[in-house]
Image: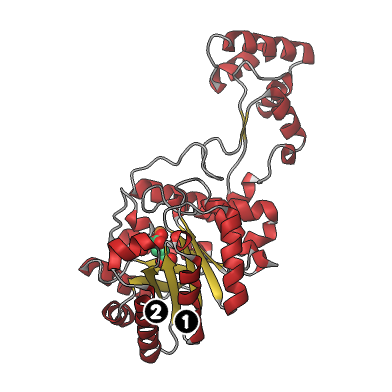
């Protein structure tokens, strides 16, 4: 099964650092890395050591933490970057080069044969210098590259037998799940190497595309906490977890799910963001039930309207009562929670009164509790 054997490459400290309001200091990076390690992600990708002196020092600081996860750094496809990356002592190096006509023209100016020559030179160099390092080669903007170009590049690199993983990147967030499935399947068939998928969310398919990649046989998915990254970011860690959990909880058993809220809060805090109300699992309304019919069924069996059990993430569900859509089952449940004994006729009358008042303005839980306590006396 494709979902039973995958790893997360957590890129909050690389792609995430490219988000508009993200600049993590060393202590923050260490805290994020420790939390992700405790959560259980398999790999942590960090910004290139060439980005800045502090970036290089921070890679060394995280390597020194001796975490369970593997520490990777992300570099352009050239030997000097590779030398600097290996010098930090990381477990793995993620090499990337653009293959789309736009990137060929505006980023590095190399033709496809030149890209292949350079890629072979760089992966050979890295393997000579570091026989045990986990080596990944990725094409940037894979989905706007010519398919023939992509396959030439991937096959040339795969044929060296020197890389562990090939990366597919939806750099501008345009791929459809069917396209991701098709491309990843093709590379799996042709190379038998591990495949990583990195998907941006510009058009809202980042989670679906990550899932399609896994269905096609990808072994690694890039995520960031809250999905932060260039523009509006990439596949969010929590969103991927929600997607896989709802297929089968066992697919995410290996992670400490109760740490997800803390991870989301930590990154939101460091980036001066609010967690979006509709965020997967940790959004303020993710486990909020409102309409009377929903509340009644959820009180009988939460799974009626919940695909995700909040308690698995250390969270709890909420039943919203003080609005015109409320029902008397929710009101009765609130009275029971408060330990009040009120007969059904009175509870129904209170429900009608809540509806009438809420036609003007929603009531707070305190107002409802006051009504219930008044009726119980
Ligand atoms: C970048 C682009 C990248 C790389 C992804 C990868 C993308 O370097 O910022 O290395 O697989 O989205 O293509 O993030
Ligand atoms: Cu990216």
Q: Quadrant of the C terminus?
A: top right
Quarter of image, res 131: bottom left
Pick whichever, 38 or 170, lies toward us. 170
Residues tagged 2 and 1 counted as in contact (Cβ below 8 A) = yes
Pick whichever, 58 or 176, lies toward us. 176
Badge 1: residue crowd in 10 Å (few <14, some 14–19, many ≥20): some
Pick whichever, 283 or 216, lies toward us. 216
Tell me: 346 left or right of 318: right
- Regarding mark 1 in the picture, which secondary structure is present there? helix
Q: How many marks?
A: 2
Tell me: 132 left or right of 208: left
Q: Quadrant of the N terminus?
A: bottom right
Residue 361 percent location from the top left of the image: 52, 12
Residue 319 vertical placement versus 171 (above, below): above
Residue at numbered disc 1: 156
Q: Residue at x 44, y 79 (%)?
A: 135
Residue at numbered disc 2: 116
Badge 2: residue crowd in 10 Å (few <14, some 14–19, many ≥20): some
Residue 197 vertical placement versus 320 (above, below): below
Looking at marks 2 and 1 on the same chain, the residue that comes earlier in the sequence is marked by 2
Can residue 332 be seen by looking at this rendering? yes
Residue 279 percent location from the top left of the image: 51, 42
């Amino acid at each position: 099964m494709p979902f039973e054997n995958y790893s997360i490459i957590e890129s909050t400290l690389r792609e995430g650092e490219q988000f508009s309001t993200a600049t993590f200091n060393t202590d923050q990076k260490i805290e994020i890395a420790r939390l992700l390690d405790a959560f259980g992600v398999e790999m942590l990708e960090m910004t290139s050591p060439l980005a800045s002196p502090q970036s290089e020092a921070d890679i060394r600081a995280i390597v020194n933490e001796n975490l369970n996860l593997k520490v990777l750094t992300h570099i352009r496809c050239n030997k000097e970057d590779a030398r600097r990356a290996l010098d930090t002592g990381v477990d793995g190096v993620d090499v990337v080069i653009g293959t789309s006509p736009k990137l060929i023209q505006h980023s590095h100016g190399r033709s496809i044969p030149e890209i292949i020559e350079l890629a072979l030179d760089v992966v050979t160099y890295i393997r000579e210098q570091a026989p045990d390092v986990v080596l990944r080669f990725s094409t940037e903007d894979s989905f706007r590259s010519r398919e023939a170009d992509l396959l030439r590049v991937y096959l040339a690199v795969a044929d060296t037998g020197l890389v562990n993983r090939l990366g597919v990147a939806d750099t501008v967030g345009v791929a459809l799940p069917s396209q991701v499935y098709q491309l990843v399947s093709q590379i799996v068939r042709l190379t038998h190497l591990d495949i990583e998928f990195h998907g941006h969310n510009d058009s809202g398919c980042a989670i679906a595309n990550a899932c399609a990649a896994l269905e096609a046989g990808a072994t690694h998915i890039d995520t960031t906490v809250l999905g932060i990254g260039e523009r509006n970011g990439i596949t969010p860690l929590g969103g991927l977890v929600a997607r896989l959990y709802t297929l089968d909880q066992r697919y995410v058993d290996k992670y400490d799910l109760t740490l997800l809220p803390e991870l989301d809060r930590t990154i939101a805090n460091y980036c001066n963001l609010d967690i979006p109300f509709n965020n997967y699992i940790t959004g303020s309304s993710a486990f909020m039930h409102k309409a009377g019919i929903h509340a009644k069924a959820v009180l009988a069996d939460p799974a009626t309207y919940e695909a995700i059990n909040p308690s698995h993430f250390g969270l709890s569900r909420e039943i919203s009562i003080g609005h015109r859509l409320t029902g008397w089952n929710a009101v009765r449940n609130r009275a029971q929670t408060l330990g009040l004994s009120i007969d059904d006729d009175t509870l129904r009358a209170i429900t009608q009164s809540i509806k009438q008042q809420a036609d003007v303005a929603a009531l707070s839980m305190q107002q409802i509790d006051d009504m219930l306590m008044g009726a119980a006396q």
